[in-house]
Image (cartoon, rainbow, N blue to C red):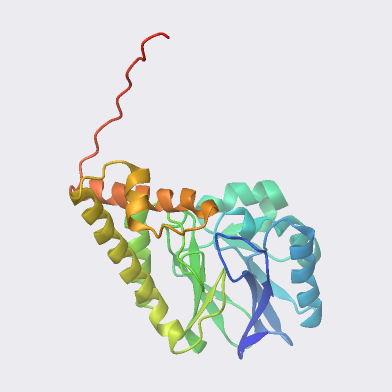
Amino acid sequence: MQVTPHTYVMHIDDDSPHHPGGSNNYFVGDPGEAMVLVDTGDQQREWTRSILAYYEQLGRPPIAAILLTHSHQDHIGGLDRIYDVIQAPVRCHPKLVKKLTSMVGPEAVTPLKSREMVKTGGGVALQAVFTPGHEVDHVAFHLPEERVLFTGDCVLGASSTTVRDLTSYMKSLHLLTTYPHDTICPGHGPVALPPRGGELVRWYMHHREEREEQILAALAQGATGVKEIAHKVYPRNLKKGLWASAERNVVTHLEKLVQEGRVTQTPSHYVLQPAS
């Protein structure tokens, strides 16, 4: 599906409860001249075949680069097989180079520089935006000519995302607001078109700020454990398989609050039980 004059999305329904709305890979540029590929999907053969089939539909354009948003398996798992077909330079965050080198060889991988412009066909280029938080090696990409942000897992289309470092993540969201955009092309979920696309990053910021206030309220009510806090701030009807992610999100919020000096963490205590 063509989203903007130079943006094409290959969507696949991967049925993951952690990112409803399926997953996306993007070809950006001019099919008659050159393009770049953003992310290579999971290692599932169906996913890889879908990307390569879409590449065929576009007419097998020259690929100027394979851009990876971050190191999670559902974004890099298909890299080796796709690289074998496309044979394009692999570009990623410097912290991801070693892992990708083991997949496709050292000659294939070149680290991105912060704010580097990666040229593609049609007279457009993508700018690399380092956005740690969801993962330490996360990179978003900005297509200024068409006011599009490719947000990987930093911002999703149909749900919130998991976060490794919330302090870094909130800084990354703020950074994304400084790049003029009307459209969000996420790693998962539907593409956010105008006007929603221009509002989504700020919604994410508000959502995290709201969650933080809920956690502070739970602490004020006497909750002290992660599970206890999670059950106070998340809906009771949350799907069973999502509770682990909910608890991880609570932990990231607590870690941020500890760093800010707003919360004190007490070490766990271990008591020997009497012999039975």
The percent coordinates of residue 195 (x first, y second) are: 43, 89
Query: From what the image shows, is residue 178 above or below residue 235?
Result: below
Of all residues, the one furthest to the top in this rendering is 275
The residue sitting at 67% across, 62% down in the picture is 41
Look at the image and tell me in which quarter the C terminus lies.
top left
Which of the pair 119/31 is nearer the observer? 31
Tell whether 103 sits left or right of 192. Answer: right
In the rendered view, tell whether residue 36 sits above or below residue 247. Answer: below
Placement of 176 over or under 93, stated as above or below:
below
Q: Give the quadrant of residue 114.
A: bottom left
Viewer-nearest residue: 92 or 10: 10
Q: Tell me if I can see residue 181 in this picture.
A: no
Could one spot residue 108 in this view of the protein?
yes
* Quarter containing the N terminus: bottom right
x, y percentage for residue 156? 50, 70
Expressed as whole percent of the image width and height from the top left, the position of residue 72 reads 58, 54
Residue at the location (35% across, 75% down)? 202
Q: Is residue 163 left or right of residue 4?
A: left
Percent x, y for residue 110? 60, 58
Residue 272 in which image quadrant: top left
Tally the marks.
0
